[in-house]
């Protein structure tokens, strides 16, 4: 029977917004958790990919982070101790230099005075006022005093070198600070690797990005696929529309 006036018979179909769910990372499908016709919610797990390799990377990164943090803590403690010891070492070395300098000056002053006394003893010995033994004793004592001067001078040189070594502590501290910065950079790098692995691990669990019904499942358990491979098609039932084809000239 003909349709009433104002009505038109058409052919069409009801459609909805379709979402294709794909794997972000390549890998082997471990478990299928949704099938065609299932109504799924946002965030519901659809497929679990094998993640043993990523888990191993996470454990490796955690071990690396723990090791680097321990090394960084030790370097920080060493640096703190070195900064405390540096002024003390310099002060002690400077005090030793001052002491040896005073010792040298004292020995030189004594040697100068005794040198004059020895000359007088020589004059008296030549005049026969003192005996030869007294002169020999004075000469021997003078020899000992000159050796004391050389010994004090050697001690002064040693103290000065020790002071120079103590001052090199500043360079050691700078080297430790550079080493600490390198450890911090390496720690940041390993942490970034761990974060990347954690993101990969999370993406190996394929979840529904939207609410809808599964209209197609394009993957089977045990299959190995590339990144971006389509796995499911979902249709959002809350956003349906009717597409029709109108006949006419």
Image (tube, helix red, strand yellow):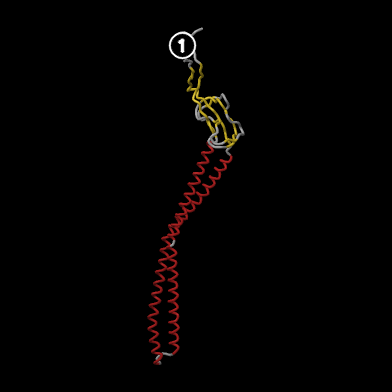
Image height check: is 11 above or below 88? above
Label 1 residue SS: loop
* Residue behind mark 1: 7
Q: Quadrant of residue 53?
A: top right
Observer-nearest residue: 56 or 98?
A: 56
Q: Give me the residue at 44% from left, 66% from top.
A: 162
In the image, taking residue 108 as reference, residue 25 lies left or right, namely right
Q: Is residue 51 left or right of residue 5?
A: right
Count of marks overlaid on the render? 1
Identify which residue is drawn at 38% across, 80% down. 112
Question: Residue 249 versus residue 127: which sits nearer the camera?
Answer: 249
Q: Tell me the residue at 39%/82% (across/down).
A: 115
Q: Is residue 191 above or below residue 75?
A: above
Residue 181 in the image, given as x and y percentages of width and height:
45, 52
- Single out the residue that lies furthest toward the bottom: 128
Q: Tell me where residue 39 appears, x and y as whole percent.
A: 54, 24
Task: Report whether 171 appears left or right of 64.
Answer: left
17 or 141, which lies in front?
A: 17
61 and 94: which is toward the camera: 61
Indicate the position of residue 200 as horizontal and vertical percent values.
Answer: 53, 38
- Against 13, is 52 above or below? below
Residue at the limit of the structure toward the top, as seen here: 1
- Residue 89, image quadrant: bottom left
Q: Position of residue 215 (x, y in %)?
A: 55, 25
Q: Residues within 10 Å of mark 1 (few under 14, many from 20)?
A: few
In the image, farthest residue toward the right: 222
């Amino acid at each position: 029977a003909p349709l009433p006036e104002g009505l038109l018979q058409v052919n069409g179909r009801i459609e909805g917004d379709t979402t294709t769910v794909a794997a972000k990372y390549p890998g082997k499908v471990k478990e299928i958790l949704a099938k065609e016709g299932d109504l799924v919610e946002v965030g519901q797990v659809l497929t679990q990919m094998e993640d043993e390799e990523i888990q191993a990377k996470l454990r490796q990164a955690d071990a690396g982070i723990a090791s680097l943090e321990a090394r960084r803590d030790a370097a920080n403690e060493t640096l703190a101790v070195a900064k405390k010891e540096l002024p003390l070492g310099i002060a002690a070395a400077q005090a030793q230099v001052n002491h040896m300098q005073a010792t040298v000056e004292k020995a030189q002053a004594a040697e100068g005075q005794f040198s004059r006394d020895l000359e007088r003893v020589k004059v008296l010995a030549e005049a026969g006022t003192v005996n030869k033994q007294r002169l020999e004793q004075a000469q021997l004592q003078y020899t000992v005093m000159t050796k004391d001067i050389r010994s004090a001078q050697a001690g002064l040189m040693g103290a000065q070198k020790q002071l120079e070594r103590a001052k090199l502590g500043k360079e050691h501290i700078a080297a430790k600070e550079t080493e600490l910065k390198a450890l911090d950079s390496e720690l940041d790098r390993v942490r970034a690797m761990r974060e990347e692995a954690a993101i990969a691990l999370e993406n190996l669990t394929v979840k529904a990005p939207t609410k809808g019904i599964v209209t197609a499942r394009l993957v089977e358990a045990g299959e190995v696929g590339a990144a971006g491979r389509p796995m499911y098609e979902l249709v959002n039932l809350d956003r349906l529309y009717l597409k029709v084809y109108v006949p006419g000239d």
